[in-house]
Image (cartoon, helix red, strand yellow):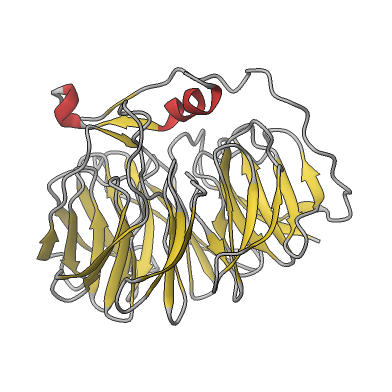
Amino acid sequence: MNLSRAKLATLLLIAPLTLGLSGCGGLSIFSSKVDKPPLPAASNTVVISPTWSVTLGGSHNVPLLPALADDKVFAAHPDGTIVVVDEKTGAQVARFALPSGSGRVAGGVGVGDGLVVVSTQKAEVFAFDAGGVQKWRVRVPTESIVPASVAGGVVVIAMIDGNIIGLDAKDGARKWVVQRQIPSLTVRAGSIPVATRGGAFIGTPTGRLLAFDLATGAVGWEATVANPKGASELERLIDVAGRPVLDATRVCASAYQGRVGCFDLARGTPLWSRDIGSLSGVVADDKNVFLTDDKGVAYALDKSTGGTLWKQDVLAGRIATGTALVGRVLMVQDIEGNLHAVNKADGKIVGRVLGATYAAVGGLSQGSETAIAITKSGQLVALSAR
């Protein structure tokens, strides 16, 4: 097994059916202490620093992504604590918790339609208002390890068995189920649904991107991001991970060991694709798509054509665990917690923070002007690059 595939083993999830268990098992054979080449030099003309920091709880070892809505950040701790803070100042707006005995939070935070939604390892979904008043609580067939998406009166939950369920935002009643089969071996970093404008979009472990009707769950189109290659199950992993990126006319996504591409939003027809695989997904601005592949190479691609604007070996021999656009830079975090600032215009490395202070199991989330992270020490942090 070469180094890139050994690294991946920290993120692998063997499906419950394969293990014969009701829970999930994982492989963990990679140590981040393997020898790596030196990091490329940084000019350090940009300073990465925290804008604010809020204590969320104790040690945080579950990839629970925060949500941003209405100029606020919503974040959950595995112990069931949920905090709401002002995105610009970090001032705490609310702090509340799941009812006693609810189990640990597994799926991050989804926000929309006035609801704050989290799911637990006991396969329950909770909905609160922004002040912490519980609106409903329902059990779903299997656990979800990614945030819900809430829009148009529907809460979209992607479950670890590959199925997607739509719940009524008013009371949690089941509206529809989209049934999908998954391979026996998948990447634990699941795809996050995006619900908007009457539709919902999500990637699958089989390299597909789905668009379905938010009201009925009817699949409108299914596009191929990548097809499996190789003889072994490990070589054939092509999960579409992360959150699809949408604009007015297109949706873009990437698959591990596969491709990155953009598709027509209404019909799903491919607009372009490139042989660049990524486990951490894509981010985009008005003109370009940015991603970091499993070899540590960061790319800026023209959103209209897929043409390469620049490529940079920013993480030579390392794993990118998250990316975010902050002002004029692409901020990249690696598995050791180091933060790297790459100039969006030319790909030059313009800043870096070394060390595990801001290491986050869930990587980086996109804020309006900052990158948001929940650190392993339990701090909710907004990071700027100036």
Residue 374 visible to the viewer: no
* Residue 211 versus residue 143 in the image, above or below: below
- Residues 381 and 212: in front is 212
Q: Position of residue 345 (x, y in %)?
A: 76, 65
**The quarter of the displayed image where residue 32 is located:** top right
Q: Report the side of 73 relative to 355 (left or right).
A: left
**The quarter of the displayed image where residue 78 is located:** top left
Query: What residue is rendered at 68% in x and 57% in y?
Result: 330
- Residues 383 and 53: in front is 383
Q: Position of residue 282 (x, y in %)?
A: 52, 57
Q: Report the side of 165 relative to 371 (left or right).
A: left
Q: Position of residue 273 (x, y in %)?
A: 46, 60
Query: What residue is rendered at 19% in x and 73% in y?
Result: 170
- Residues 225 and 127: in front is 225
Query: What residue is rendered at 51% in x and 27% in y?
Result: 7
Q: Position of residue 94 (x, y in %)?
A: 47, 62
Residue 322 visible to the viewer: yes
Q: Report the side of 82 relative to 178 (left or right).
A: right
Query: What residue is rendered at 51% in x and 33% in y?
Result: 59
Q: Quadrant of the C terminus?
A: bottom right
Q: Report the side of 385 relative to 64 (left or right).
A: right
How many marks do you count on the picture? 0
